[in-house]
C-alpha cells in the first residue's frame, strides 16, 4: 500500500454561525468585521414574496444602507454591474448575501471588484436559504448572457468571511428548490470521494454528509416545517463541500454548469439529472470510492459484498432517492429536446474523465 501523501489548503473563512435563530446575530457579526455601511444582495422572490429580507434588514438596523434584490438565476453579468453601481454610490464597506448560489456567487464577484478598486476586501456575510453550499467555496460562477454560457473564476479571497446557517430562514424556500439543492450537496460529496489526489479530511466529511442527506432529505419532504431536519441538512451541505480547494469538482458538476446556464435549468435540478448516471459511468474506474458510499448507507445488508456490486448499488440508491423525493431525473423532464443534446456535447468538453464518444453515450442516458 502506498504512503498517504497530499496537500491541504485552508480557505480564509473566519466564522460559521449555525442553529435556529442564529441570524439574530447578524449585526453583532457586522460590528466584529468592522462594517458600518451594508449592502444586502438577494433575488426578487425572497425580497418580494417572503419576509426574509425584511428580517435581515431589521437585524442589521442602522448598518443597513441599501438592498439590491435583482440577482437572477445563474448570476448574469448585467445584474452584477447594477449591484456594483449601487455599492459604489452608497460607499458600501460590507456585503450581506441572502439566498441560493446565484446571489452568493454574485456577492463574491462584487466583493472582488470592490477589492480591485479600493485595495481592501469588503467583509462578506453569506446567509444561505438553499443547500447549494456556494457560501463555502472560493469558486464564482457568472453567466455571459450573450453566449448563454457559465463562466467564472476561482480566487481564495472570494470565500465569504462569515456564514450564518439559520434553518428558520429556509422555511419559505420552495420545497422543490430546497430538496433539489440537497441533491446538489450530495453531488459535491459524491464527487469529492473520487476527485484526484488524497483528501482524507474531505472524504470523512463527505461520507457523513451523504449519510445525513439520505436521512434528512426524505424527513424534510415528509415534514417541511421541521427546522431540526433543516438544520441537519445545512450541516450536511457544509460537510459536502468542505474546503473546496482540496477536492476538485467532477463530471456531474461540469455538465450541470453547462446545462444550467445554456438552458436555464436550476443547478439543483441539473444534479438530480446528472449525478446517478455519472456514478454509473464511474463504477468501473472508481469502484472503491463509490463502494464507501454503499457501506455508509449500509447497503451491504442486502447481500452485496464485492466492491463493483456495492458501487453500482450506490448509484442506484442515488437514483431512488431522487425518485422518492419527486424530483426530475431526465433532461426531457425539464423541457430539453433531443436536438439540445448535440449543443451540450459541443460545449461540454473537454472533460479529462470522459472521451467524446462516452460523453455522447452519457447524454443519451440523461435524455
Image (tube, grey):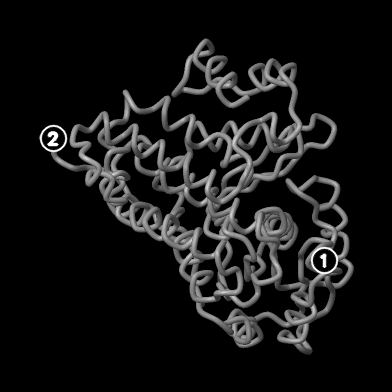
Q: Which residue is drawn at 82% across and 72% down?
A: 91
The answer to whether residue 267 is above or below residue 92 is: above
Along the viewing direction, whichever of 5 and 337 lies nearer the viewer: 337
Residue 87 marker? 1
User: Residue 69 vs residue 348: left or right?
Assistant: right
Residue 347: x %, y % from top left: 67, 21
Q: In which quarter of the image is the N terminus?
A: top left
Along the viewing direction, whichever of 73 and 213 lies nearer the viewer: 213
Q: How many labels does the image show?
A: 2
Residue behind mark 2: 2
Residue 131 marker? none
Along the viewing direction, whichever of 124 and 199 lies nearer the viewer: 199
Q: Quadrant of the C terminus?
A: top right
Residue 297: x %, y % from top left: 31, 51
Disc number lying in front (2 or 1):
2
Task: Give the crowd class for mark 1: few <14, some 14-19, many >=20 residues within 10 Å.
Answer: many
User: Residue 313 vs residue 214: left or right?
Assistant: left
Distance between the Cα atoms at labels 2 and 1?
Answer: 52 Å
The answer to whether residue 262 is above or below residue 232 is: above
Q: Secondary structure beneath disc 2? A: loop
Q: Secondary structure beneath disc 1? A: helix
Q: Which residue is drawn at 50% across and 31% down?
A: 251
Residue 16: x %, y % from top left: 49, 73
Question: Can residue 119 be seen?
Answer: yes
Amino acid at each position: 500500500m502506498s504512503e498517504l501523501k497530499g496537500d491541504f489548503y485552508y480557505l480564509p473563512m473566519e466564522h460559521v454561525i449555525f442553529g435556529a435563530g442564529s441570524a439574530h446575530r447578524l449585526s453583532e457579526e457586522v460590528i466584529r468585521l468592522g462594517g458600518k455601511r451594508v449592502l444586502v444582495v438577494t433575488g426578487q422572490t425572497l425580497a418580494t414574496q417572503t419576509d426574509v429580507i425584511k428580517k435581515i434588514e431589521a437585524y442589521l438596523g442602522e448598518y443597513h444602507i441599501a438592498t439590491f434584490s435583482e440577482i437572477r438565476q445563474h448570476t448574469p453579468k448585467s445584474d452584477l454591474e447594477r449591484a456594483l453601481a449601487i455599492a459604489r454610490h452608497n460607499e458600501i464597506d460590507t456585503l450581506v448575501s441572502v439566498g441560493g448560489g446565484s446571489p452568493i456567487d454574485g456577492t463574491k464577484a462584487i466583493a472582488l471588484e470592490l477589492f480591485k478598486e479600493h485595495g481592501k476586501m469588503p467583509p462578506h456575510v453569506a446567509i444561505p436559504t438553499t443547500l447549494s453550499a456556494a457560501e463555502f467555496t472560493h469558486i464564482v460562477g457568472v453567466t455571459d448572457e450573450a453566449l448563454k454560457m457559465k463562466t467564472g473564476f476561482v480566487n481564495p479571497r472570494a470565500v465569504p468571511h462569515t456564514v450564518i446557517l439559520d434553518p428558520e430562514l429556509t422555511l419559505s424556500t420552495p420545497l422543490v428548490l430546497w430538496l433539489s439543492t440537497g441533491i446538489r450537496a450530495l453531488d459535491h460529496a459524491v464527487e469529492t470521494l473520487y476527485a484526484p489526489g488524497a483528501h482524507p479530511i474531505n472524504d470523512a466529511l463527505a461520507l457523513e454528509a451523504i449519510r445525513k442527506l439520505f436521512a434528512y432529505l426524505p424527513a424534510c419532504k415528509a415534514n417541511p416545517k421541521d427546522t431540526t431536519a433543516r438544520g441537519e441538512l445545512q450541516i450536511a451541505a457544509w460537510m459536502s463541500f468542505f474546503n473546496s480547494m482540496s477536492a476538485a469538482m467532477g463530471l456531474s458538476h461540469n455538465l450541470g454548469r453547462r446545462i444550467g446556464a445554456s438552458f436555464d435549468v436550476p443547478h439543483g435540478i441539473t444534479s438530480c439529472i446528472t449525478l446517478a448516471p455519472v456514478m454509473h459511468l464511474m463504477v468501473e474506474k472508481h469502484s472503491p470510492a463509490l463502494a464507501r458510499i454503499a457501506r455508509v448507507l449500509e447497503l451491504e445488508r442486502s447481500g452485496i459484498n464485492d466492491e463493483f456490486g456495492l458501487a453500482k448499488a450506490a448509484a442506484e440508491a442515488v437514483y431512488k432517492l431522487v425518485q422518492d423525493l419527486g424530483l426530475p431525473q431526465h433532461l426531457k423532464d425539464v423541457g430539453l429536446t433531443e436536438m439540445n443534446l448535440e449543443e451540450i456535447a459541443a460545449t461540454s468538453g473537454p472533460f479529462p474523465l470522459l472521451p467524446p464518444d462516452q460523453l455522447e453515450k452519457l447524454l443519451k442516458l440523461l435524455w
